Image (cartoon, rainbow, N blue to C red):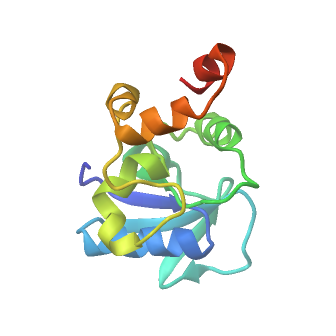
Amino acid sequence: MSKIDAIVFGAGSHARKVAHALSVNGRVVRAFLTSRSTGADSIDRVATYTLKTVPDSFRTDCQVFIGILNHRDPYLQLDDLLRENGFLNISWPWEYYPSLHCELGWCYWLDPEPMTPSQWRNTSDYSSLINLLSDQESRQIFD
């Protein structure tokens, strides 16, 4: 992970954990960023901004860490929203989790040691799961 300043997109409990984990790992967290106002000027002594109020320099000078970890916010739409607003350096939970998992703790589907698809195919778990499928089409879709 680079050492440029960070912005955390989101203002919920996971976003706060991400900001803390980044700080513990020596990153400067400049702001929490949200799509609409939270009604607070700061969270945990870190400034909060909306996409409309964030300083322009943050768009190019900071790395955005997605602090949203739920099923209600489609990541593809968040990616489009951030890019449309000038944010290009975006780090997703599966990208930063391996570096921050000690501070973040267990996070649902994230893995501190992610495998590539080819590595996953060579595990006994993969073999066990694919052998449970009874037809070739199901095996192909799973693969």
The residue located at (74%, 68%) in the rendering is: 37
Residue 71 visible to the viewer: yes
Does 29 sit above or below residue 91?
A: below
The residue located at (72%, 74%) in the rendering is: 38
The answer to which of 132 and 12 lies nearer the viewer is: 132
Horizontally, residue 17 falls left or right of residue 49, namely left
Corner quadrant of residue 49: bottom right
Horizontally, residue 75 falls left or right of residue 119, namely right
Residue at the bottom extreme of this rendering: 44
Corner quadrant of residue 14: bottom right
Does 73 sit above or below residue 89?
A: below
Residue 89 visible to the viewer: no
Does 104 sit above or below residue 113?
A: below
The answer to which of 9 and 53 lies nearer the viewer is: 9
Corner quadrant of residue 39: bottom right
Spot occupied by residue 138 in the image (x, y as percentages of width and height): 67, 22
Horizontally, residue 5 falls left or right of residue 64, namely left
The image shows a total of numbered marks equal to: 0
The residue located at (58%, 71%) in the rendering is: 48
The answer to which of 115 and 13 lies nearer the viewer is: 115
Spot occupied by residue 79 in the image (x, y as percentages of width and height): 61, 39
The answer to which of 135 and 30 lies nearer the viewer is: 135
The residue located at (54%, 67%) in the rendering is: 32
Spot occupied by residue 15 in the image (x, y as percentages of width and height): 54, 68
